[in-house]
Amino acid sequence: MNKYLTCLAVALAAGFPGEATPQTPDPAAEAAARKLFDTRVIGAELKLQGEYVGNDREARVGVQVVARGDKSFHALVLEGGLPGDGWDGGRYGLLESGPLSNGKVELRSPGDDGAGAVLDESGLALKRGGRTVLLKRVDRKSPTLGKQPPAGAVVLFGGANPNVDAFEERKDIEGLSAPLMFEGNLLAGAVTKQKFRDYTLHVEFMTGWEPQNIPWRRADAGVYMLARYEVAIGDSFGFDFDLSGATSPTRPPLIGGTGKGSKFPPAKGAAAPRVCGSVFTYPSKVPNACLPPLVWQTLDIDFTAPRFDAGGKRTAKAVISVKLNGQQTVDRLEVNSPTPHGFKGPEAADGPIWFEAFGRRVLYRNIWVVEQP
């Protein structure tokens, strides 16, 4: 074989620079993902779930409508507007519905205080205090959605030819996590080959459709800095705070009672559940900036690794700041120790980024890292 053909054979075997390594299809994972992310099979519930805004006299009011399975819904009535856009994390109202019928849903207060609403594709009519307030649906987008990596960034996933070459198969607490794709996006369950220390991480993600699941378990996943410090990802859109546990330093009180008679049981204990955009087991500064499932969202994370002296003693804790959909949910939080469920072993000065699988119920795209000197 001449020299040219020898070089060509080697190049073909190794893959040309920049060429994606072909991915072996996983029919079972693809079928499971289709049930979570294919909007064609969901139906009318998807058209009604979402956010609604209007004015009650001179005051702004926001409502988050959440599908709960079996074509029923609950709604949070937020005085002042939506999370991150008027609502201050204070008092809120809860409405619950029977099943969707003839394209319409009727909701009422579990406390029988006369409050209620009628919802259809034209909007939401909120009834309270003897008056009806008309609210229109809004579809909010993160201000950093589609943000492009700056010069010098390490692109982990995205661009014109997305592939899983930046990730490896590695044994974690769930067994082997092989990086997989679904319709051009990265499925949850991937570990970077490269280790990082101090950096800014941009991630775009979408949570799957799980209305039948209990609220604090929907699309339950996380992104782990150094594979040890978890920034929680999950479908916490429209959490009933009183039932689900604390999502802010002060749990907002439910108007008219404690949700007695609600379909969902209360959380066990007062510890914060896995609220999207928080550091797991720590509260979020902004009560629930999560957008609905099947909507692309963003995490922008600044991470500083822990520091150690020559003898291996830690001299500074890991520090994390997080913005979820442009809202500052975590601000320079010093993390006392690795959060639960991360990779085993002592704290380290660097490590990979782990996109936890936990059932592969989250999609990712446009993932890049800017390393800090």
Image (cartoon, rainbow, N blue to C red):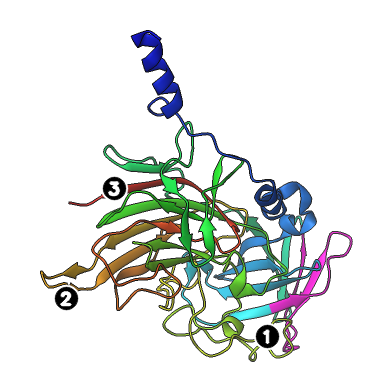
Callout 3 touching callout 2 (CB < 8 Å) = no
Residue shown at 40% from the left, 22% from the top = 11
Residue shown at 30% from the left, 40% from the top = 150
Q: Which residues are magenta?
A: 95-120
Counting from the top left corner in percent of width and height, residue 289 is at 49, 65
Image quadrant assignment for residue 99: bottom right
Mark identifier at residue 214? none
Secondary structure, mark 3, is: strand
Residue kind at label 3, given as amino acid type? Val
Residue 264, relative to residue 31: is it above or below? Answer: below
Residue at numbered disc 3: 370
Q: Which numbered disc, 2 or 1, marks the residue that appears first in the sequence?
A: 1
Is 61 on the left-hand or right-hand side of 317?
right
Residue at numbered disc 2: 313
Camera-side residue: 252 or 224?
A: 224
Residue at numbered disc 1: 265
Secondary structure, mark 1, is: loop
Mark 2–mark 1 distance (CA, rounded to whole Å): 44 Å
